[in-house]
Image (cartoon, coloured by chain):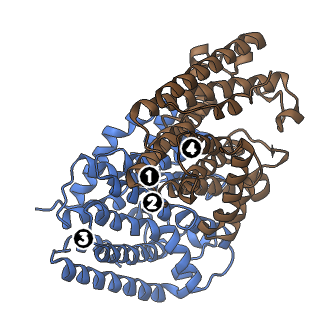
Chain colours: A brown, B blue
Amino acid sequence: MAESLEQLKDRVTAYLATHLANDIDQPTLAASMRYSTMAGGKRLRPTLTLATVEILGGQLDADVMRAATALELLHTYSLIHDDLPAMDNDDLRRGAPTNHRKFGAGMATLAGDGLLTLAFQWVTDNHLPAAVKSRLALELAKAAGPAGMVAGQARDIEGTGQQLSLDQLRYLHRQKTGALLRYAVLAGGIITAQPEKVQRLLAQFGASYGLAFQIYDDLMDVVGTTAQMGKQVGKDAAEHKNTYPGLLGVAGAEEQLHQALHQARDTQTALCRLTGRSFAAYDDFLAYFKL
Amino acid sequence: MAESLEQLKDRVTAYLATHLANDIDQPTLAASMRYSTMAGGKRLRPTLTLATVEILGGQLDADVMRAATALELLHTYSLIHDDLPAMDNDDLRRGAPTNHRKFGAGMATLAGDGLLTLAFQWVTDNHLPAAVKSRLALELAKAAGPAGMVAGQARDIEGTGQQLSLDQLRYLHRQKTGALLRYAVLAGGIITAQPEKVQRLLAQFGASYGLAFQIYDDLMDVVGTTAQMGKQVGKDAAEHKNTYPGLLGVAGAEEQLHQALHQARDTQTALCRLTGRSFAAYDDFLAYFKL
């Protein structure tokens, strides 16, 4: 019987709590890296990887846990650097002081650098086959790097205050949020050594899911409450960020969200047909988008 | 006939000039990453890898060039983040404005993040065997990460203004500078698939070389000139940094340098004996330390 999302999330958090400190060799750096990593959150990305491994018949052993949880390290780095005074200059994250407010901007920069680098250690210092490990490192680097997430961040900085077209906005978010969620699902296929065709569909599901995720996040910043989202809402408009509702209105953004979810469900169906396995577990991830 | 250090350095620079832009998908980010990567420098780390590959009979083909040059991306990231206002707050690097002075601290942070991540892409998106690629990614992550270089940086920040013991100072520098130079030499052994015993000696040579490098750098900050070093001297004392001459005086630091060089030469001899190959090319690297 497959584990629920909640169980997978708890396993990721427990793995981090047990193993993170072993790989850090300076006390303040350890405190700073641990502070943001253990600050809560949905653990969405590694949970997507683990659910995909389970769907495809893989075991969630220590090696798979390590390789999958690496993505949470990388995600946490992106939040710490994103919050820095030189970037978004945020004081609060998940209701608590941001890393630099607690440890100073220098240590926060290093904590992010440490988490990013440690992510590549965790995908390669396990006992999965070498071909799997080198492919995970490569796909993670492409998703997170200067043609992926970092490019999206740069595009976001450069585009703030400018009016982007829908195509430009979609492209920005495909890099900024989409690439890592795409990797999260694809990684489950790499770990279980799926054929090329299955890996392509997994990546496609992840990409559609990532698009839906970003549109939903934008929408909630307009129509959601702070309590519901666990973070301050109404920030995007105040900061002249380019968003889906800003560009298309709430109804237009909802329409885009429905399209992305429709694509994700189509791909889910195609994956069932191609592999003969049930991808019903993905329903739990798609249930996240409540309007 | 093996290539000279100068030739290897030029090959690294040419490789960067040709290939860097292909992997960056945002114009300002590309300009910022390129600015620091092409700002000159000795290209010492990839040159150490390439010289080691040549000594051990490997070819410097496109795949080896890519895997070796990745280390220069990583080294450049460390300089950009180190210079940031939140860290050392330097205005000049190699006689030119630092990255954040030219592109702003936000884009400089992203350029560093992009270079760090791209380094892991370059060690894994080539055609070397999967076992070599995953091992390179792992050793690079360990050398650069929160038990290596990033820990050394954190120790440096935390130790500034405090008096460290010689053991503490050596430990700091083993992490901060030594780990990456150790990796540079070891990588040549991984790429050419050397036996464990040879890899251990290569790592040992790199570690001794790295120690000598840091002591020499500290010494030159006291006895060198700005023209000779291509950077401002006398900074360490002004900033109350812990250094070898600060702790041991110039003569004591010179004595430590000679010890480190002696160790490096012993290991060089052991490598010749074990492999039956000439490691004379390492003489050129050791000739760097002129007092």
Please name the residue that numbered disc 3 is placed on.
B284
The alpha-carbon separation of the residues under discs 4 and 1 comes to 30 Å
Q: CA distance from mark 3 to mark 2?
A: 29 Å
- Label 4: few (<14), some or many (≥20) within 10 Å? many
Q: Are marks 4 and 1 on the same chain?
A: no
Task: Identify the subunit bearing mark 3.
Answer: B
Choose between A147 and A85: the one closer to the eye.
A147
Residue assigned mark 4? B108
Tell me what residue is drawn at x 36 percent, y 61 percent: B45
The numbered mark, 2 or 4, whose residue comes first in the sequence reads 4
Residue at x 41% of width, y 55% of height: A129
Q: Amino acid at mark 1?
A: Lys
Horizontal arrangement in the rendering, residue B98 relative to residue B55 (left or right): right
Front: mark 3 or 1: 1
Q: Secondary structure at mark 2?
A: helix
CB of mark 2 within 8 Å of CB of mark 1?
Answer: yes
Residue drawn 71% across the image and 61% down it: A17
**Distance (Cα) linking label 2 and label 4:** 26 Å
- Where residue B259 sits, quadrant-wise, is bottom left
**Distance from Cα at disc 3 to Cα at disc 4:** 34 Å
For the N terminus of chain A, give its image quadrant. top right
Horizontal placement of A230 versus A204: left or right?
right
Q: Nearer the viewer, residue A112 or B112?
A: A112
User: Cα distance, mark 2 to mark 1?
Assistant: 9 Å
Residue A145 is at least partly visible in this image:
no
For residue A133, the mark is 1
Q: Which mark is residue B138?
A: 2
